[in-house]
Amino acid sequence: MHMRFKINEKAINSFVDPEWRRQIPFVLYQTIKKTMIEQRKLQQEAMPKYMDGGPTGWTTRGVLYKAGSKRNLHGFVYYKEDRPYMHLIVDGGQDVAKKKKLSEPVNVRVTKQGNIPKGYTAKNLKQERFFGGIPKGRSGEKYRGLWRRIGKTGYTKSGKARGKIKLMVSWARGSRYQKKTFPARQIFNDHVPKYFERQLPIMLQQVIAKEIARLSTKTGF
């Protein structure tokens, strides 16, 4: 997911003294870079407000920016491709299982972000009191999942389970619809144009001042 913006370099040139117009590409590059850095920070700071339990470090580190160069002026903020869930919470859409089914918590103590703890299913499938699939005597995908045996284990001579079972993780669905929950594009659009407009004259003054100082040192005045 990328969020971009464009600038009109010719329009900016018309407002700058001809003596300093050759500095415009560098000024624009620096302004774009500063704006993208600030926008990345705002995206990260907004996450706890919209994400239940707050973002993980993995999610926060997935926000990146690019600012091009003075010869290739562009800027955008984006989320790394290995965070596909960000596309879903920003734009909404169908969450399709990477394998055959989604793993959805039923009777599991989830993390503060609402996720099944890492390794929970794999670890418990090795335990005698857990099993995966559809229990005997039940039919239909709604019963597919990770189950826990409660009480006595095994079966009676008649084939009836001695104890009870409890569904811990459901594997019933192959997809689900994810609503938009994080307004990343709105945060970008509300901030970037205004911030860029404020920073551009500041950056222009700084670059010109440095250039004047450099020329003064070079000429000895």
Image (cartoon, rainbow, N blue to C red):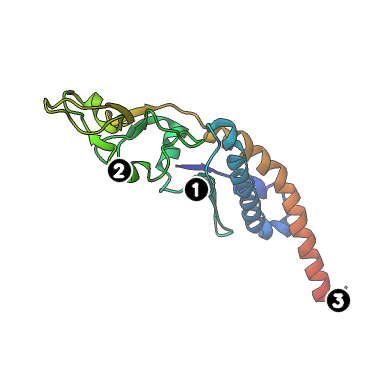
Q: Residue at (40%, 42%) from the top-left corner?
A: 84
Near mark 2 (Cα within 10 A), the count class, few <14, some 14-19 or many ≥20, is: few
Give the CA distance from mark 1 to mark 2.
30 Å
* Residue type for callout 2: Gln
Task: Between residue 97 and residue 111, name the one nearer to us.
Answer: 111
On the image, numbered disc 2 is attached to which residue?
Answer: 127
In this rendering, would 50 be left or right of 142? right
**Of the residues tagged 1 and 2, which is closer to the observer?**
2
Q: Residue at (49%, 29%) from the top-left corner?
A: 181
Give the CA distance from mark 1 to mark 3.
53 Å
Task: Between residue 181 and residue 100, name the one nearer to us.
Answer: 100
Q: Image height check: is 6 above or below 206?
A: above
Residue 23 location (% of width, % of height): 68, 59
Task: Between residue 72 and residue 169, name the one nearer to us.
Answer: 169
Q: Given contact means CB atoms under 8 Å apart, are the residues at marks 2 and 3 in contact?
A: no
Mark linked to residue 220: 3
Asked which quadrant contains residue 98, the reply is top left
Near mark 1 (Cα within 10 A), the count class, few <14, some 14-19 or many ≥20, is: few
On the image, numbered disc 1 is attached to which residue?
Answer: 58
